[in-house]
Amino acid sequence: MFYRIHQFWQAIHPIITEDELAWAISLLPAPCLTLFLGQPLPEQRHALDVAQDLWNSGIRDSHLLIAALLHDCGKTRYPLKLWERVAIVLLQKAPRKIWHTLSHSSLPLAASLQAAEAHPLWGAEMASHLGLDPRIVELIREHHTPHSQEGYLLYQADNRH
């Protein structure tokens, strides 16, 4: 519960130090900078937290770290308001049937739920269009539904932040 309060606070007051930004830039190939810096500050903060989590656990795989920094870049196609992000986090604990029913309803939240489901695919498409390594593209695509060991590591780190 505390980490969700912390996450909410970070969404309202994201702070990225110069050292953190320099670290991210050192990991990202030039084409990736537009994807990373094009994300809202709260998403950049979250991406840094996920990548630093992996780094602090001893992971040095550049593909995985780049994917961590870009895993939510697809959210830029349909930016969500803070209340929508909070609702999505709360609904993630609901039975899948409720999510499905709401996302196919006429409620204002329906499009937000659809965007939440689609952002991994959107992000993978964006990364692919930049010519990023197919492994990075696949890690972004599978960050909510991991199909590989690296994907599972990203999924776990994402869920911790």
Image: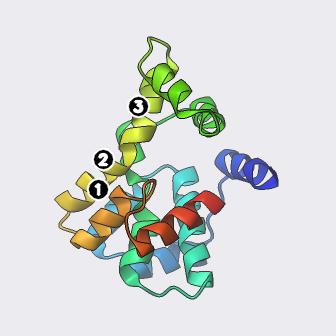
Residue placed under numbered mark 2 in the picture: 122
Q: Secondary structure at mark 1?
A: helix
Q: Amino acid at mark 2?
A: Trp
Q: Amino acid at mark 1?
A: Ala
Quadrant of the rendered image containing residue 137: bottom left
Q: Amino acid at mark 3?
A: Gln
**Does the CB distance between marks 2 and 1 fall below 8 Å?**
yes
Residue 18 vertical placement versus 61 (above, below):
above
Q: Position of residue 133 (x, y in %)?
A: 23, 73
Residue placed under numbered mark 3 in the picture: 114
Q: Secondary structure at mark 2?
A: helix
**Does the CB distance between marks 3 and 2 fall below 8 Å?**
no
Question: In the figure, is residue 44 to the left or right of 120?
Answer: right
Residue 75 vertical placement versus 34 (above, below):
above
* Circle 2 residues within 10 Å: few <14, some 14–19, many ≥20: many
- Please tell me which residue is depicted at 63% across the width and 70% down the height of the picture: 17
3D distance between C-alphas at marks 2 and 1: 5 Å
- Please tell me which residue is depicted at 41% across the width and 31% down the height of the picture: 114
Question: In the figure, is residue 15 to the left or right of 39?
Answer: right
Quadrant of the rendered image containing residue 157: bottom right
On residue 124, which mark appears? 1
Q: How is the image coloured?
A: rainbow
On residue 62, which mark appears? none
- Please tell me which residue is depicted at 46% across the width and 27% down the height of the picture: 100
3D distance between C-alphas at marks 3 and 2: 12 Å
**Does the CB distance between marks 1 and 3 fall below 8 Å?**
no
Q: Position of residue 65 (x, y in %)?
A: 44, 76
